[in-house]
Image (cartoon, helix red, strand yellow):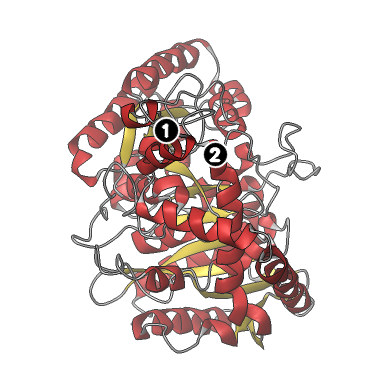
Amino acid sequence: MSLGRAWKAGDFRLIQHLHQAYASGEVGVSTVIESFISEIQKKRSLNAFLSERSEPARAKARELDQLLSSSSWSNIRQKLPLFGVPLAIKDNLHVAGEVTTCGSKMLQNYRAPSDATVVRLLQDAGAVLIGKTNLDEFSMGGSGENSSFGPTLHPFLEGRVPGGSSSGSACAVAAQMAMGALGSDTGGSIRLPASYCGIVGLKPTYGRVSRNGLVAFGSSLDQVGPMARSVADLSAIYDVIHGHDPRDATSARLSREQVAAETQASSQDWKSGDRPVRLGVPQEFFVEGVDAPVRRAVESALEHFRSVGCELVPISLPHLVHAIPVYYVIAMAEASSNLSRFDGVRYGTRSDEAAQAQTLHEFYAQARALFGREVKRRILLGSFILSAGYHEAYYRKACQVRRLIANDFQHAFERVDLIVGPVSPTTAFELGSHSRSPLEMYLNDLFTVPANLAGLPALSLPLGSDSRGMPIGLQCIAPAFQERRLLGWAARAEAELASRAVTGSSK
């Protein structure tokens, strides 16, 4: 099946079909990359990309075409598992010599001294990086509206947000401007836009993927992860980027595991050893405030999984009621600390007004005026949380409750293999509808932040759309460092959901 026919047929194992096309000589790398560059140019109104890497991508494609003509495909595929695959990179990851803005005017002229580890790994695997994507400023937002360079628009729902903060990456994948992308997830920033845009997104276990070269937001929460149209493509990207990195002090000292091939094998049945897969369903994920279409879609999918062999186990995660305040106390405190370096002296743009300041106070007031409203809010609240007299009352207490949340998950995983529920209480909301209420915006993270607080791997899997065409995502959470289990089950679930949609049994 050609790449174009596969896309139209809804078979989103795009990397597999692309490599079949390369192997058969049906298409060359330059032709493929040129088609994606054309798509990016045609869809600039979506504002998914902050910088387009057209010339570097073309140069890389020519290099790969020469390799394709001089080497056997088996050797190429073995050494370069992402050969000729066009990928996008969230613009809080460094590409050597290129601007890393983090969606902020504060860094609009900053050029990275070296590649992020994940960027180097992708390039070494033969991927073609076609651009850097838009994001909420310094990854602070859940809608894609907070970028200093304008909001990212939803790829196919006019007037709706694409989700954030990895808004540009999700939009690029959903709008066929890239086969996959990297995002970062501090409290749901991969899973929320994946859910809103109808694609797959993975937040790996904390420490499983290197953070070297990622501009930090919340250092104990941030994790880099892939986004794609299918679990197979997601697994192929994850295979390349995960593993221990000595340049990241938080990187787990674990050997690499190849999950893409096993994902195909494990997608054949629902067993965990000699028993059914046990899916934990937390009562806290089905509370008041979850939109009826979201609840119905998730409950319908879970009932279908039960009918084909999974065991649904009701569970409780009692301390999740505190997850939002705990997350925002910790995240804002860490953001305040991490962003202190962007002062126009060590890092950041120094405006003309700041350069003419007469006092240190005036200098900082002018230099930091480049931050957006949401970033200023989080810096101020974080600084208050860490101030003398409040550190013990807020930050330390939040860390203690964070431990209780992690314990809830640990106890639950003694009874179940995976935990499932909605990604978000709602589908994609209207642009500007939550702008005046930070609390409303923060509550969209209700079901995603617990996995970050506990450091667990979590994935958003498309369930289809509601009656208005709004995508809905199913969240699946696994024990720490069990990405193989998570992706294997997700591949089987993806195939089952596709089969259910074809037969019409979802109605």
Q: Are marks 1 and 2 in contact (CB under 8 Å)?
A: yes
Horizontal relation, residue 416 to residue 111: left or right: right
- Residue 272: x and y, percent? 73, 70
Residue for point 43% across, 50% down = 166
For this rendering, which residue is in front, 110 or 22?
110
- Residue 176: x and y, percent? 31, 44
Q: Quadrant of residue 40?
A: top left
Mark 1 Cα shell of 10 Å, populated few (<14), some (14-19), many (≥20): many
Residue 309 in view: no
Q: Quadrant of residue 56?
A: top left
- Residue 461: x and y, percent? 48, 63
Q: How many marks?
A: 2
Residue for point 81% across, 42% down = 253
Horizontal relation, residue 144 to residue 64: left or right: left
Q: Secondary structure at mark 2?
A: loop
Return the disc, 1 or 2, that comes first in the chain's sequence: 1
Q: Which residue is mark 1?
A: 107
Q: Quadrant of residue 399?
A: bottom right
Q: Secondary structure at mark 1?
A: helix
Mark 2 Cα shell of 10 Å, populated few (<14), some (14-19), many (≥20): many
Q: Which residue is mark 2?
A: 215
For the N terminus, the image quarter is top left
For this rendering, which residue is in front, 278 or 181?
181
For this rendering, which residue is in front, 149 or 19?
149
Horizontal relation, residue 137 to residue 188: left or right: left
Residue 203 in view: yes
Task: Judge whether 75 appears above or below 141 on screen.
Answer: above
Distance from disc 1 to disc 2, alpha carbons, whole Å, reads 11 Å
Nearer to us of marks 1 and 2 is 1
Residue for point 53% across, 72% down = 447
Residue type at the position of mark 1: Leu
Residue type at the position of mark 2: Val
